[in-house]
Image (cartoon, rainbow, N blue to C red):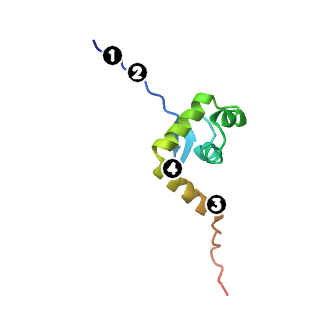
Amino acid sequence: MKLASIPTKQYIEQREEEYWLEGTRISLDSVVYSFLNGESPESIAQNFPLLSLEQVYGAIAFYLANRELVDAYLKKGEKESFAVPKIEGSSSL
């Protein structure tokens, strides 16, 4: 007896160097930070009405399966958001 192939769903997509919930403008960061702050998947889905509960669980599963990669990605984003842009042509005193 041969089992039928089961299609898999993608919940996360990479656009350039950032991760997003597939087909949305909601970043993986938003869901992961909510999860790390102790919010339940149900609460996260309520806070992001464009996401289904399935999508939230998919994002959390992606994070848990790729924790080292996503944690490094989040850390990089934090560093970049706090970096002071260097203005060309300016000199320090």
Tell me the amino acid under the disc marked 4.
Val
User: In this picture, is 79 found above or below 34?
Assistant: below
Quadrant of the image occupied by residue 89: bottom right
Graded by Cα atoms within 10 Å as few (under 14), some (14 to 19) or many (20 or more), the crowding at tag 4 reads some
- The local secondary structure at tag 1 comes to loop
Tell me the amino acid under the disc marked 2.
Ile
Q: Is residue 65 visible?
A: yes
Mark 1 or mark 3, whichever is nearer to me = 1
User: Is 20 or 52 nearer to us in this picture?
Assistant: 52
Q: Earlier in the sequence, mark 3 or mark 4?
A: 4
Q: Is residue 23 visible?
A: no
Q: Write down the residue under mark 1.
A: 3
Tell me the amino acid under the disc marked 1.
Leu
Q: Which mark is residue 70?
A: 4
Q: Tell me, yes or no, whether the two marked residues, 2 and 1, touch with CB atoms within 8 Å.
A: yes
Assign the N terminus to one quadrant of the image: top left
Q: Tell me, yes or no, whether the two marked residues, 1 and 4, touch with CB atoms within 8 Å.
A: no
Residue positioned 58% across, 28% down in the render: 54
Q: Write down the residue under mark 3.
A: 81
- The local secondary structure at tag 4 comes to helix
